[in-house]
Amino acid sequence: MRENYSVYLPQYSVGPQCYDEIGAVTRYFGKKVTIIGGKTALQKAESSIKKAIDKTDLEYLDTVWYGGNSTENNLKAMLNHEAVKNADIIFGVGGGRAVDTAKAAADTLDKAYFSFPTVASNCAPTSAISVLYNDDGSLSRYYFTKKCPLHVFINTKIIADSPEELLWAGIGDALSKECEVELATRGKALFHTPLIGLKAAAACTDPLLEFGEEALRSIRKKHPGFEFTQVILDIIVSTGIASNMTCSAVNNKIEYYYNSSLAHCFYNAYMALPQGHDYRHGAVVSYGVLVLLTYDGQIEMRDKIAAFNKKLGLPVTLEEIGISEEHEIDVIIEKAPEINEWTCVPYKADQKKYKEAILAVNEYGKSL
């Protein structure tokens, strides 16, 4: 444990008029702004962001498409783009991969960075991690930024106009936070920062179970009501706080990592399958949550989450994530020990037991 360290927590503005806060929030960080984002996200949010910029002393330089995926090569393209290099401030607009690319570029170039999520599918807008991929879609690495985004502008009206499937997957992804952090930290002598992260993670599950169904009804109506807002804050903010407090890296070398465990291990190993890109990250992770709970013997909680998954249409069987052959499960089992999260358990992980858990979830899911 280092004697001196800094902790950065996400600040955020939320609501349909939250872009009105851009001037007050950014005034201390420079003048020149470049926007990086996804195509659909920019269609929905760029004009509103630029109108807000016009009311400030900021100077808008350019809007840059991030490239379509948070790959190493797309990151390099951002680093070499003149408008990105000349900016004081970077606005990252869109879903997880767009904001991860913008976040990593801003961190590399030492620019002030602000997130503008247009969907609620994960905690990328608030976290101090960018997930980077190779051009073939396989995982390249986790890029740990020096600090989390300086501020997150959560426009509930814009997010309410996003695809229901992305919120649905975001709920599945957020379901993993509490059980993964609890498992990864169990038995550890936690000092202040990860201890607070553990407690933050404990606040992630119940709002999803209580408000998740209504939030999906709200997004179908494009109505950002109370329940909808509680769920997107859970997905974007609560999980982001837990993530930032439960992992640390120095010069991109992991110091401690309690942010995830066997649920994301399942997802990352699953990505070795040809159908890995056919299913939403959060959907596959939600099945991984059931695997984790089964593996760890938390059967009562497994059954509770499985019933919730079934109600929302999240996966409870292997067929629902495109697995029909045993050899496909074996690919996951063989890949799992290569995944960082395989070691994020309080005991030695066992491949045979992991396979048994995967199959047990499938059998239970068929009974629902």
Image (spheres, rainbow, N blue to C red):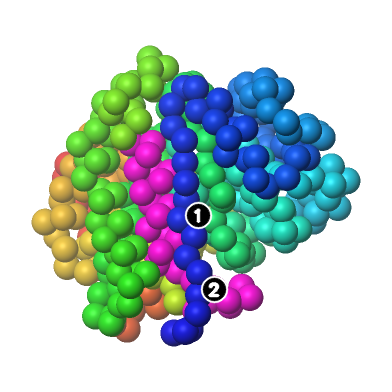
The overriding secondary structure of the stretch rendered in magenta is helix
The residue wearing badge 2 is 249
Of residue 116 and residue 285, the one placed in the foreground of this image is 116
For residue 311, which quarter of the picture? top left
Of residue 14 and residue 311, the one placed in the foreground of this image is 14
Q: Position of residue 3 (x, y in %)?
A: 47, 84
Give the residue type that dot 1 points to: Ser
How many tags in the picture? 2
Query: As drawn, is 222 to the left or to the right of 218?
Result: right
Q: Is residue 163 depicted above or below 327 in this figure?
A: above
Q: Position of residue 120 (x, y in %)?
A: 45, 37
Mark 1 Cα shell of 10 Å, populated few (<14), some (14-19), many (≥20): many
- Residue 279, labelled with which disc? none
Specify the segment rendered in magenta: 231-255
Q: Give the residue drawn at x 14%, y 60%.
A: 299
- Between the C-alphas of marks 2 and 1, the distance is 13 Å
Q: From this viewpoint, is residue 252 visible?
A: yes
Q: Position of residue 303 (x, y in %)?
A: 15, 51
The residue wearing badge 1 is 127
Based on the picture, tell me whether residue 124 belongs to the magenta stretch. no
Q: Is residue 81 depicted above or below 358 in this figure?
A: above
Query: As drawn, is 170 to the left or to the right of 112?
Result: left
Q: Give the residue drawn at x 19%, y 55%.
A: 302
